[in-house]
Amino acid sequence: MAKMIMIVDDSQTMIMSLRATLEMNGFKVETAHDGLQALNKLKSGVKPDLIITDINMPNMGGIEFIKNARTLAGLRFTPILALTTESQQTKRDEAKKAGATGWLVKPVAGPDLVKVIKQVLPGA
Amino acid sequence: MNPLLEQFLIESRDFLQGIGEKLIQLESAPDDETLINELFRLVHTLKGNSGLFDFPEMTRVLHASEDLLDTVRAGRIAYTRELADLLLDAMDFVSMLCDEIETEGTIKLDHAEQSSRLTASIRELIEDVDSGNSTAEISESSNKEEVQFNSIEKLSIIPDDIRTEAYRMVMEGKDIHYIQYSPSEECFYQGEDPFYLVRQISGLLWHDISCRQPWPSLQEMDAYLCNLVFTMLVACSREEIAEHFRYVMDQVEIVALSSHELEAISSGQGANPFSSENQTTEVAYEEKSQRDFVSLSDAERELVKEIVTIQHEILSLPDDVEWFQGRLKAVANTLSACCVKMGKKDAIPELESSLKEAISIYNSEPLLAWLEKHIMATYRSEVKQLTGKEVTEKEIKDEPVIQVSPVHPQGCNRQKEFVNSGNKTTGKIPAPRTEARLASRILKVDQRKIDRLMNLIGEMVVSKNALPYLASKAEDVYGIRELSREIKSHYSVINRIVEEMQDAIMQVRMVPVASVFQRFPRLVRDIANKLCKEVELIIEGEDTEADKNIIESLADPLIHIIRNSLDHGIEPPEERIKAGKSAKGRLIIRATQESDRVVIEISDDGRGIDPAHIKLKAYEKGIIDEATLEHITDQEAINLIMAAGFSTAETVSDLSGRGVGMDVVRSAVEKVKGEIQIASEKGKGTRITLSLPLSMAVTNVMIVQSDGRKFGVPMDMVVETVRVAQHDVSAIKDKKITVLRNRVIPLFNLNDLLGINMPQRLNDDGELAVLVVKTYSGNAGIVVDEFYETTDIILKPMEGILAGIRAYAGTALLGDGSVLIVLNPKELV
C-alpha cells in the first residue's frame, strides 16, 4: 500500500514541486491550498500517513491547522512536518509546540525530502 | 519551458500584483496588521517558490524584502513611504526578472549588480534597527548545546567488547559519540517515533533503553506518555547526529568520546578492554548471582515469587489466542531468568524442552508442569495460603476480562467506525458542496485553450453558413424543393445553437476592466510623487466586462492618458490654490457598459486644454494651414492633439514626453475598433472618453469585387457607396478626384492600390463604383468593380511573413468555403 502524504500549501508551484518528488518515490499525494481546506478534507475522511504543511497561508495558517488537526480522531500520532524557511526559528518552535513532528526548510531538494520522510514515517 | 517554471511564473505574477496592491493600501493605513501580515505572507511564499529554481538574483532580493517586512511586522520599524518605494522597486525588479525568464528562459548575468544593490539598500534599513539583537541570539544558541558530560560512569554499562571496538575506532581517528536522548513525555502526540528514530541513526554501535522515572504499576501507567531514555554509542560526526535529531535537539545530549575516556572507564572498572577477559567477568557475574540467591533480601525474594506467580497465572490463561507462541516464549524467558536468580540453573534445559513441547502441542500444560515441578513445589508451603487462593480467584476473574478485552476494542472500533461513518454521512453532504462551490468559482485556463475554442467556433459559424448555399443548390441545380426546405429548417436550428455557443464562449473571454485598472493606483502614486503633485484617484465601474484582448490593448493607451492628465492636466498644489481649487487634484476613471460597447471615461479637474494654444502650436508645426487656423472650431482644435506629431508640453518631461503622443493612443484605440473623444474646458478640466466594442470576435464586412476577385472591407470604415459617372471625375495633377456633396474626395483605383494591372470596370451606365472610406487624412474613395452584400465574418489576422503587409487586415472563410481577403483601407490609401 502506497503511503499517502498530504501537502498543504497556498502556492501551486510549491505543491507541484513537492508532488513531483513524492509521486516519483511512490507516494500517493493529496493536496489542499490552505489550512481550512486541509482540515475539511481530514474531517471528511481523508487519512494521510504524513502531512506536510506550509506555515504562512491565507484563511488558516499552518500553526493553527496543526493545532486543529491534532484534535481530530486518528490524527494524534500522524507525523506532521512544517514547511519553513531558514529565517523562521520562532515559527519552528511555535509549530513544534502546536504539535508538529518536525520541519522542512524551503526549498526542499528531492533527496532531502525523501530522507526526512523516511526518518519520520516508519515503513516508508 | 517546463511546467513547473511556467506555473511559477503565472503564480509569481499574481503574487506581485497582490504585493503591489497591498503596498499601496498600506500607505493609507500603515498600522493595519492584517495587511502587513498578508503582505509578508505573499513575499514569503514568493521567495520560497523562487528558491525552487536557480535564480539567486531574485531570491536574494525577495529574501531581503521578506526580512524587512518581518521587522515591520514585529513593529521594530515603521512603514514609511521610503520603505514602500524601496519595496516597490524590489518588486518591479522581480517582475522584470519574471518577464525575462519567460522570454529568455533564464536570467541574464548583468542583473546581479542591481540585485545586490537593491538587497543592500533593503538590508541597510533592517540593520539600523536590528544590529543589536542578532548577536545576542547567536551566543545564546551556541551555549545551549554545550552540555557538560557529567555521567562518565554511564559508559560502564556498555559491554566490554563494544567498548573495545569503540576504543579501536577512536584510535583510528573516527568520531565516537555518546548520545542520551530523552524524548518528551508528549512525543507520541507529535507524531514522533523515538525508537524508530534511534534505530535509524547511522553508525549505531550500541544502544540501551532505560526509563526516566521508575516504572509505575501497570494500573497507574499511562502508556501514551513516553518514559524512555535512550542511550547510544554511535560512530558518526556531530553534524550527522545533529542533523538526524534536528527535530528534537533540545532532548538530546551529545558527548564526543575520546580514547582516554573510554580507557578510563574500562580501567576504572578493573577490566582491561584489551584482554578479552569479558567472558570470565560474565561467568563471575553468574556465579555471584547463583551464590547470592540465598543472600537475596526478603524483599527481593518476594519479588521473584511474585514474578513466578504471575507466570503461573499467564500459563493458566486460555490458549486460544494468536499470540500464544510468543506468550509461551516470554514466560519461558522470564522463568529462565528467575532460575538464574534463584540458583536453579540446572532446571533450564528442562524448561527449554518443555517450551518446545508446549509450542508443538499448542498447550501451556508442559510449561505449567515444569513450573509446578521445579519452582512451585519449593514455594508450595509458603505460597499456598498466600497466593494459591488468589491464583484460582484471579483465574476466574481474569478469564472474562481477557476474553472480553480482545472483543472489546473491536467493539469499540466498530462503534467508532459507525460513529465515523455517521459523521461522514452527515458531514459529507455539506462539505463537498461548499468545497465544490469554492473550487468552481474561478478556473484558471490557459488563454491558448480559449483562443482555440474561439477559432473552432469561428469555423463552425462559417461552415454552418454553407447550409443556405446547399439549400439553394438543392433547389436550383437539382430541383428538389422539399430537400431545400428541410435543409433550411435544419439550418435555423443549428444557427441558433451556434450563435448561443459563440455567445457563451465570448462570455468566457470577458474579463473585468479591473485587471487593467488595478495597476493605476500604483501608477498614479508614482507619477504624482515624482511631479510633486497631490492627486486623488477615483476608480468606478471596475466590474465592467469586455473581451480580454480589448481590455489588454487598452492598458497602454489608458496609461498614456493618465500620464498626460497628471503631467499636463493637474496643476501643482500652489497653482491650484491660486486658481481657487483644492490643493489635491482629482482624477476619475470610470467604466460603464452602454449596449454593446464599453465606455471608459478619464476625467480630471486640471487646467484643461487651451484651444487657442493648440491652434497656434498646430500651425507652428505645420499640421494646419493658415486658412484652417482661421475657421477651425475649438472642439476641432482640441481634436488636433490626436494628430500625428503633436505634443504640446513646453518641456519634454520624464513622464509623458516619450516621443509618442495622443496619436498613438488614437491608433491603438482604433485598432480595436474603438472611438475616442476629448472634451475640455479651459481651467476646469479635461474628459477623455473611449468607446470600445465588447468583443471583436465578429467583424461586419462589405464584400466588393475587383478584377474578378472578392475582397472584404470592414463596415466601420465604410462611409458610403456611390456610383460616380465617369465625367464627374476630374484630375488634379496626376491624382483623380471627384466632388461629393461639395467636398473633394480623392479617388484611388483598387487595382492600382493592389498592383493589379487592369482598369476598373464600369457598369452598364458607364458609372464607377466608389466605396467611400475613412482614412487618417479624411475620407477617400476607392474605386472597385462591383459592390456585394455585407456579412459577418471571423477575421483571422495574417500570419508569419504576411503579417507585415499592413494593407490587409486579415482573412476570413466564407460560407461557401472560399477565402475572403479583408482589406485595411486606412493603410491601403
Image (cartoon, helix red, strand yellow):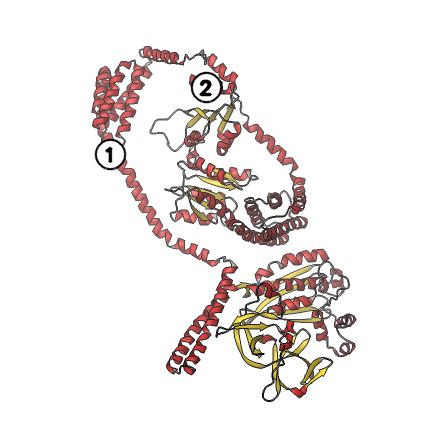
Image spot of residue B710 (x, y percent): 55, 76
Residue at the disc numbered 2: B165
The quarter of the image holding the C terminus of chain B is: bottom right
Q: Identify the chain of the residue marked 1, using the numbered disc in the image.
A: B
For label 2, the SS is helix
- Mark 1, residues whose alpha carbon is within 10 Å: few (<14), some, or many (≥20)? some
Image spot of residue B288 (x, y percent): 35, 11
Left or right relative to B473: residue B175 = right
The residue at the far bottom in this view is B765
Task: Tell me which residue sits at (56%, 39%) in the image.
Answer: A86
For label 1, the SS is helix
Q: Amino acid at mark 2?
A: Glu
Left or right relative to B144: residue B204 = left
Disc with the residue nearer the chain's start (1 vs 2) = 2
Image spot of residue B43 (x, y percent): 58, 47
Picture disc at residue B403: 1
Image spot of residue B579 (x, y percent): 75, 66
Q: Compared with residue B535, is residue B667 higher up or lower down, i.e. above or below?
A: below
Q: Is residue A112 visible?
A: yes
Q: Amino acid at mark 1?
A: Gln
Residue B285 falls in which quadrant of the image? top left
Of residue B554 and residue B137, the one placed in the foreground of this image is B554
Q: Compared with residue B775, is residue B563 higher up or lower down, i.e. above or below?
A: above
- Mark 2, residues whose alpha carbon is within 10 Å: few (<14), some, or many (≥20)? some
Q: Compared with residue B130, is residue B398 higher up or lower down, i.e. above or below?
A: above
Numbered disc in front, either 1 or 2: 2
